C-alpha cells in the first residue's frame, strides 16, 4: 500500500522515502535517473523474479533522502509482459518484501504527449502523489509544438516540470517539486474518467469493495485494481486477484462484465475514453502546427532505416565498433599488463620456491591477471553499445533487423535482447520479458546465448593476436585481425537465424507477434549515462574476475600442480646441479630453461589435470586440439573467459613468464605435440574460436534460463543443442581449413 504522507517532515529513522520513476520506453527515463542519482545507485533483482531492480539515492535536502526506483518502461498498466507486471505490482504495493511507494515521478516525451499521457492517466488514478517531468522539450520546440506548462499542470492536477535530461536542464526545479510533494503538497489527481457506460463506475466500486482488506485506507488503489481486473479480461490483474480472493471475486467480475455485454470490448472502450480525455487536455494546453515541421531526425531516418542503405550502414557501424575494440585497447592493455607483471615479480620475491609461490604467481596472479588485462576491450565494447543506445540509433537498428527476424519467426522485439547479449547473455535473456508472445520470448531466450558476449572477447583476441597476421586489407582502413574479430561475432548471428527458424517450425509453432516500435528522437549521448553504463558493466566484469575466475583458476592450478612426485623433482634437481657445475653464461641459461620446461611438461602430464586430459583427448583430436586445450575448455564451463586464465596457468607452470597476453601467445605458439609438431596453427585457432562462439559454457546463463522459463527442459535443451552445434562447427572449421591448406 502507498505510504500516507503527513503535512510535517518525517523525523528520526522515518526519513527515508521511496519514489517510483515510470514512463514509456525511449522517453529518456534512464538518463533522468542517472542525472538525479549519479553513482549512488545499485542494481539487483526483485524478490522471487529475475526482473532487474535499479535503485538510486536522491538527496533532496540535508534531512530528506529518497530511494528513486527506476521501473521498467511500459506503455500501460494493463500488464501482459513480465516487465509490465512488475510495474503494476510495485505501484499497487503488491510486490513482496518491497516497501510502499510514497510518490511517482512520471516522465513523458514532450514531442509525443498524446501517446505518453495514456500511462500518466492510469498512474494518476492510483491516488499516489505524483510529479510529471516534461522531457525532450527542445525536440518539441524544434517541431513547432508549444506547451503551456501551467495549464497542463492544472488539467492533470499535479505539478509539471520542463526538463531536458541529457543536458541536465530543469533538474533543480524537479528536485524542488519533489521536495514540496514529500512535505505534503495537495493534489486532486483523477477519479474514473468520464465516458464509460452509465452504471459502470458503480460496478467498479462493487468489485473494489471486495478488495478493501488489501487496500485499507486507499480507495483509489482499490478502484484502479478493480478497473484493471474488469477491463483486462483474462489478464494479469484478474488472475492474481482470483488467486487471493477466490471464486467470490470471479462472480463479481462476471457480473460486472455481464451488465455491459453490449459493449464490444471493454479494453477498446478504455482506450477510447482515455484518448478522448487526452485530446481535451491537449486542446487546452498545447498548440502545434497542422503539419509538424520535418526535423533533422526525420531526414536522417530516411537514410538509416532504408532497406538497402540502412542495412549497409548498420554493417559498417558494427565493423567500425569491432575494429576499434581491437585497435584502441592496445596501449591500455599494455599498462594493465605492466601492472600485473610488476605485481607478480614483487610478490614472487617474498616467497621461496614451492607450492605457495606457484599458487600465488601461476594460479592467482597469472589466472586473474590474464583476464583482467582485457578490461579495456570490454569497456570499449560497452562504451559503443551505450553511445548507440543513448543517441537513439538502436531503435532504428531494431526496425532494420525486424525485416530479417520476421523471416525466421521472430520480430524486431527480439533485437534488443539479442543485442544486449553481445555484452552479456544474462541481461539479454532478462530483457526478453518485454516480449509479449510466449513463443517469441522462448525462442529469443534460446538463441540469445549464441550472440558473442564480452566473455568470449578475451578468447578471440588471444588467438587472433597469436595466429592471424596483423596486415591491412582495403588499404589501411581494415585490418585482417579486426575483420576476423568481426567475423567471430557474425558466426553467432548467422547461426541464430536458422536455429530460430527451426524452433518456430518445430517445438514452438505459432503466430509471430506484431512489432510496434516508437522511435526516440536523436540526441547527443549523455556523458553521465554513457559513463555510468561503462563503469557499472566494467565493475561487474571485475567482480566476476574476482570470484568465479579466481576460484576456477585456483582449482585448475591445484589439478595441474598435484601430485608432485618427490623422486621426479629430486631427479631434475640433480640435473640442474650438474648443469650449474659444468656450464656457464648463455649455455647455462639455455640448459636450465630446457630443464625447467621438460620438468614442467613431465609434472603436468602426471598431474590430475594431465591424466583427465589424456582420457578425453580422443574426443578433441578431430578438432585439432590436444588434451591441454580440451581440459582448458572443460575448466571454462563456469565462465567462458576462464579458458584464458586456465591456458595461462597450464603454460606458465615452471616457466619464467608473466601474465601478459604476448607471453601467453608465445607459449601457445611454442606448444608442441609429443612428436614435435606445433599444437596451434590457424585452423586450430579458428576451431577453438568457433567452438566458443557457439558453446553454452556459462553457468550464469544457464541459471537465468532456468529462472526465466521456470523449466529445466529448456535449460537442458539450450546446453545440449549449443554444445553439439559448437562441436560440429569446430570440427567442420578445422577439417575444412586443413583441407584448404591453411595449416601449412
Image (cartoon, grey):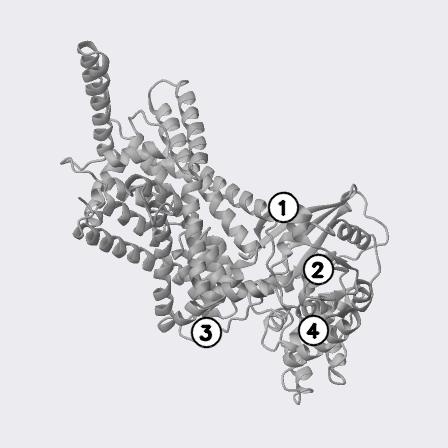
Q: CA distance from mark 2 to mark 1?
A: 26 Å
Which residue is tagged 1? 41
Residue under label 4: 226
Nearer mark to the viewer, of 2 and 1: 2
* Residue 639 seen by the camera: no
Which one is earlier in the sequence, the residue at label 1 or at label 3?
A: 1
**Quadrant including the N terminus:** bottom right
Q: Position of residue 586 (x, y in %)?
A: 23, 16
Residue 301: x and y in percent read 54, 65
Of the pair 598 and 96, the residue shown nearer to us: 598
Label whose residue precedes the other's in the sequence (4 or 2): 2
Instruction: Residue 643: give x, y in percent of width and height.
Output: 34, 42
* 548 shown above or below 19: above
- Residue under label 3, please give it: 512
Give the mark nearer the N terminus: 2 vs 1: 1
**Label 4 with label 2: CB-CB less than 8 Å:** no
Asked whether 679 or 224 is in front, the reply is 679
Between discs 3 and 2, the one toward the N terminus: 2
- Tell whether label 4 touches label 1 (CB within 8 Å): no
Position of residue 13 measured from the top left corner of the image (x, y, whole percent): 76, 43
Residue under label 2: 137
Element under label 3?
loop
Q: CA separation, marks 4 and 3?
A: 31 Å
Question: Is 664 displayed left or right of 175 in the figure?
Answer: left
Secondary element type, mark 4 = helix
> CA–CA distance between discs 1 and 3?
37 Å
Amino acid at each position: 500500500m502507498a505510504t500516507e504522507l503527513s503535512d510535517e517532515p518525517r523525523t528520526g529513522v522515518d526519513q527515508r522515502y521511496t519514489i517510483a520513476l515510470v514512463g514509456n520506453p525511449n522517453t529518456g527515463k534512464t538518463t533522468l535517473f542517472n542525472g538525479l542519482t549519479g553513482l549512488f545507485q545499485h542494481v539487483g533483482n526483485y524478490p522471487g523474479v529475475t526482473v532487474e531492480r535499479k535503485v538510486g539515492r536522491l538527496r533532496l535536502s540535508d534531512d530528506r533522502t529518497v530511494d528513486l526506483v527506476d521501473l521498467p518502461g511500459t506503455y500501460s498498466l494493463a500488464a501482459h509482459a513480465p516487465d509490465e507486471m512488475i510495474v503494476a505490482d510495485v505501484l499497487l504495493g503488491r510486490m513482496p518484501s518491497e516497501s510502499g511507494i510514497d510518490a511517482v515521478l512520471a516522465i513523458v516525451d514532450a514531442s509525443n504527449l498524446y501517446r505518453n499521457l495514456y500511462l500518466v492517466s492510469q498512474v494518476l488514478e492510483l491516488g499516489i502523489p505524483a510529479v510529471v517531468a516534461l522531457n525532450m522539450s527542445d525536440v518539441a520546440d524544434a517541431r513547432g509544438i508549444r506547451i503551456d506548462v501551467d495549464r497542463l499542470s492544472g488539467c492533470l492536477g499535479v505539478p509539471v516540470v520542463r526538463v531536458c535530461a541529457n543536458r541536465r536542464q530543469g533538474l533543480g526545479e524537479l528536485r524542488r517539486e519533489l521536495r514540496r510533494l514529500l512535505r505534503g503538497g495537495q493534489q486532486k489527481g483523477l477519479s474514473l474518467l468520464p465516458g464509460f457506460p452509465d452504471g459502470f463506475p458503480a460496478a467498479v466500486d462493487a468489485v473494489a469493495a471486495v478488495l478493501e482488506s488489501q487496500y485499507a485506507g486507499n480507495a483509489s488503489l482499490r478502484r484502479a485494481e478493480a478497473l484493471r481486473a474488469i477491463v483486462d479480461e483474462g489478464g494479469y490483474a484478474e488472475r492474481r486477484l482470483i488467486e487471493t480472493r477466490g471464486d467470490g471475486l470471479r462472480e463479481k467480475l462476471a457480473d460486472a462484465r455481464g451488465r455491459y455485454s453490449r459493449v464490444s470490448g471493454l479494453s477498446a472502450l478504455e482506450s477510447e475514453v482515455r484518448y478522448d480525455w487526452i485530446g481535451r487536455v491537449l486542446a487546452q494546453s498545447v498548440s502545434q502546427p497542422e503539419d509538424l515541421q520535418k526535423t533533422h531526425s526525420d531526414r536522417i531516418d530516411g537514410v538509416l532505416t532504408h532497406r538497402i542503405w540502412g542495412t549497409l550502414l548498420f554493417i559498417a557501424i558494427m565493423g567500425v565498433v569491432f575494429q576499434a575494440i581491437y585497435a584502441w585497447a592496445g596501449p591500455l592493455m599494455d599498462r594493465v599488463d605492466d601492472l600485473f607483471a610488476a605485481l607478480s615479480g614483487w610478490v614472487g620475491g617474498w616467497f621461496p620456491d614451492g607450492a605457495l609461490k606457484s599458487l600465488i604467481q601461476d594460479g592467482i596472479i597469472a589466472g586473474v591477471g590474464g583476464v583482467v588485462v582485457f578490461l579495456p576491450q570490454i569497456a570499449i565494447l560497452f562504451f559503443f553499445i551505450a553511445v548507440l543506445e543513448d543517441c537513439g540509433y538502436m531503435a532504428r537498428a531494431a526496425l532494420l533487423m525486424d525485416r530479417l527476424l520476421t523471416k525466421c519467426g521472430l520480430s524486431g522485439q527480439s533485437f534488443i535482447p539479442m543485442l544486449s547479449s553481445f555484452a552479456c547473455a544474462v541481461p539479454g535473456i532478462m530483457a526478453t520479458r518485454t516480449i509479449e508472445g510466449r513463443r517469441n520470448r522462448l525462442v529469443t531466450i534460446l538463441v540469445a546465448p549464441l550472440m558473442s558476449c564480452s566473455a568470449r572477447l578475451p578468447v578471440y583476441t588471444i588467438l587472433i593476436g597469436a595466429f592471424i597476421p596483423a596486415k591491412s586489407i582495403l588499404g589501411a582502413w581494415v585490418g585482417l585481425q579486426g575483420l576476423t574479430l568481426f567475423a567471430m561475432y557474425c558466426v553467432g548471428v548467422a547461426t541464430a537465424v536458422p536455429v530460430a527458424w527451426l524452433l518456430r517450425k518445430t517445438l514452438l509453432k505459432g503466430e509471430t507477434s506484431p512489432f510496434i516500435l516508437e522511435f526516440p528522437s536523436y540526441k547527443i549521448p549523455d556523458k553521465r549515462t554513457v559513463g555510468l553504463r561503462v563503469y557499472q558493466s566494467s565493475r561487474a566484469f571485475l567482480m566476476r574476475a574476482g570470484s568465479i575466475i579466481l576460484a576456477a583458476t585456483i582449482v585448475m592450478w591445484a589439478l595441474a600442480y598435484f601430485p608432485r612426485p618427490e623422486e621426479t623433482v629430486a631427479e631434475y634437481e640433480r640435473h640442474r646441479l650438474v648443469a650449474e657445475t659444468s656450464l656457464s653464461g648463455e649455455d647455462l641459461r639455455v640448459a636450465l630453461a630446457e630443464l625447467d620446461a621438460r620438468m614442467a611438461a613431465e609434472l603436468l602430464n602426471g598431474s590430475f589435470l594431465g591424466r583427465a586430459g589424456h582420457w578425453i583427448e580422443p574426443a578433441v583430436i578431430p578438432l585439432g586440439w590436444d588434451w591441454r586445450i580440451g581440459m582448458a575448455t572443460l575448466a571454462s564451463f563456469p565462465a567462458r573467459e576462464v579458458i584464458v586464465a586456465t591456458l595461462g596457468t597450464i603454460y606458465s607452470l615452471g616457466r619464467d613468464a608473466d601474465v601478459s597476453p604476448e607471453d601467453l601467445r608465445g607459449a601457445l605458439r611454442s606448444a608442441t605435440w609429443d612428436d614435435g609438431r606445433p599444437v596451434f596453427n590457424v585452423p586450430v585457432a579458428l576451431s577453438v574460436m568457433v567452438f566458443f562462439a557457439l558453446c553454452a559454457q556459462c553457468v550464469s546463463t544457464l541459471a537465468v534460463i532456468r529462472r526465466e522459463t521456470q523449466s529445466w527442459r529448456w535449460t537442458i535443451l539450450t546446453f545440449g543443442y549449443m554444445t553439439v552445434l559448437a562441436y560440429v562447427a569446430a570440427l567442420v572449421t578445422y577439417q575444412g581449413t586443413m583441407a584448404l591448406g591453411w595449416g601449412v
